[in-house]
Image (cartoon, helix red, strand yellow):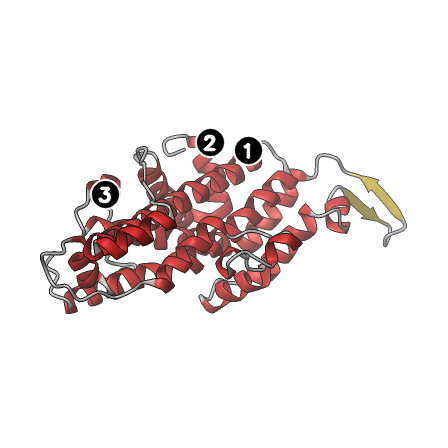
């Protein structure tokens, strides 16, 4: 998208110049991601290994956590980029309903990434020295479990609306959170007017009045109804004028946790979870990175 003047113009009109700069960072990283393969040992085999070779089991345990962290961060960024592309394409095509569906998808996607990746990133940063020790069993043999991190990342990867049959057997981490949970999270992060924005998008994407009456004009105090099939452009412009700051903040909250997680994983210098694309990105202004940096410094990390 970066370099496409039409799409950049559409995005600027939708989320402002600040939002466009965030999308350019998102594009820079996603366009440079390469294929990764992550090997996960079946639980029964892992239990046997852990009983026979405890230190090798610990090494595998933390390695698989780093794999999940990398995969989750990368896919969060890819997913955000795709929703942003959908918003820009729908605006360019003057398609109000596709625009609303993509914007709603971006809100939910960003909240989901923030909910999982922010605590997982902080957890890995706090446990950096213990993870390094587990990766190299000749070092400090003190071991710490990272169950909360693992649960957050598993939830990001596998959470869904469970069927009645699944509810009795699936782990709690596999149950998707509600839209209300996500909106509350975004409100706590001070996203402006997020509930009003989300409510309107739902009214447009559901078979509700707004999805119908957006294509109508009323005259003579409501006595005369006019069909307006080309209303998309004006309705989108009205939405952007009202919710542009909301969109920019939503993009930021969907971008930053994945970006910081990838930056943190690079600190381990493990090829399978290393992302060259983030090396050139300055994350010092991101509050989450400041907290990560503080935790790493306290454990003797030298940049």
Could you say which disc has been placed on residue 92 in the image?
1
Checking the image for residue 6, the label placed there is 2
- Which of the 4 image quarters holds residue 217? top right
| Residue 170, placed above or below residue 227 | below
Q: Nearer the viewer, residue 172 or 209?
A: 172
Element at badge 2? helix
Q: Which one is in front, 58 or 179? A: 58
Eyeballing the image, is 176 above or below 94?
below
The answer to whether residue 158 is above or below residue 87 is below
> Of tags 1 and 3, which is closer to the observer?
3
Q: Residue 230: horizontal and vertical position, in percent?
A: 71, 34
Q: Position of residue 188 (x, y in %)?
A: 47, 69
Quadrant location, the C terminus: bottom left
Pointer 3 residue: 274
Rendered location of residue 13, percent (x, y):
50, 44
Q: Is residue 213 left or right of residue 64?
A: right
């Amino acid at each position: 998208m970066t370099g496409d003047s039409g799409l950049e113009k559409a995005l600027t009109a939708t989320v402002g110049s600040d939002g466009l700069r965030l999308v350019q960072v998102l594009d820079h990283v996603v366009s440079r991601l390469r294929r990764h393969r992550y090997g996960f040992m079946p639980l029964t085999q892992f239990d046997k290994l852990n009983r026979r070779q405890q230190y090798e089991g610990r090494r595998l345990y933390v390695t698989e956590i780093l794999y999940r962290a990398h995969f989750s961060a990368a896919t969060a960024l890819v997913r955000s980029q795709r929703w942003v592309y959908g918003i820009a394409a729908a605006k360019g095509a003057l398609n109000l309903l596709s625009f609303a569906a993509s914007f709603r998808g971006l809100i939910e996607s960003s909240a989901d990434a923030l909910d999982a990746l922010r605590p997982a990133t902080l957890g890995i940063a706090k446990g950096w020295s213990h993870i390094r020790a587990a990766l190299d069993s000749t070092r400090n043999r003190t071991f710490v479990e990272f169950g909360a991190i693992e649960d957050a990342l598993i939830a990001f990867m596998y959470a869904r609306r469970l069927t009645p049959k699944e509810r009795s057997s699936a782990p709690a981490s596999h149950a998707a959170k509600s839209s209300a949970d996500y909106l509350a999270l975004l409100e706590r992060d001070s996203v402006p007017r997020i509930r009003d924005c989300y409510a309107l998008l739902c009214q447009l994407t559901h078979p509700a009045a707004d999805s119908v009456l957006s294509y109508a004009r009323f005259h003579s105090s409501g006595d005369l109804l006019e069909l307006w099939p080309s209303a998309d452009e004006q309705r989108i412009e009205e939405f952007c004028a009202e919710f542009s700051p909301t969109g920019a903040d939503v993009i930021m909250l969907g971008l930053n946790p994945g970006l910081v997680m990838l930056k943190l994983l690079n600190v381990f210098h493990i090829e399978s979870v290393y992302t060259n694309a983030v090396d050139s990105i300055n994350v010092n202004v991101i509050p989450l990175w400041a907290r990560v940096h503080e935790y790493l410094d306290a454990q003797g990390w030298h940049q």
